[in-house]
Image (tube, helix red, strand yellow):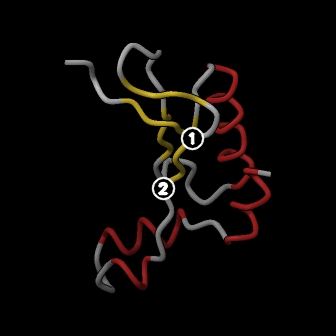
Amino acid sequence: MTAPTMRLGGRSVGGVNPTYVIAEIGVNYEGDADICARMVEACAAAGVDAVKLQTADPDEHYAPDTESHATYRRAMLPRESTAEIFA
């Protein structure tokens, strides 16, 4: 039995195909768009196939007055900044 494959973008993934590497960037850019952009560029320079940028609206996903809410509030990037980074 052969392992299943699928297409992701222009690449076949799974089976005997090379591993598809996805880098994940959490909130460690601390809300600084320049740092986030440099992290994305570093991922690309390292040769990853994709970057997953963790973004969350703290008001939608975390209870107010919690450490998680405060952390994500500090690290939140405006949607426009996120779009510019990936453009």
Instruction: Give the x, y percent position of residue 78.
Output: 67, 71
Q: Residues within 10 Å of mark 1 (few under 14, many from 20)?
A: some
Quarter occupied by residue 44? top right
Instruction: Give the x, y percent position of residue 4.
Output: 31, 29
Residue 56 left/right relative to 61? right
Q: Which residue is mark 2?
A: 54
Q: Kindly identify the amino acid type of the residue bearing the numbered disc 2.
A: Gln
Identify whether 16 is placed above or below 29: above
Q: CA distance from mark 1 to mark 2?
A: 10 Å
Circle count: 2
Element at badge 1?
strand
Taking the view exactly as shown, the residue that stands out farthest to the front is: 1
Q: Residues within 10 Å of mark 2 (few under 14, many from 20)?
A: few
Instruction: Give the x, y percent position of residue 71.
Output: 42, 65
What residue is at 60 percent from the left and 60 percent from the top? 31
What residue is at 47 percent from the left and 15 percent from the top? 18
Q: Kindly identify the amino acid type of the residue bearing the numbered disc 1.
A: Val
Q: Which residue is mark 1?
A: 51
What residue is at 57 percent from the left and 41 percent from the top? 51
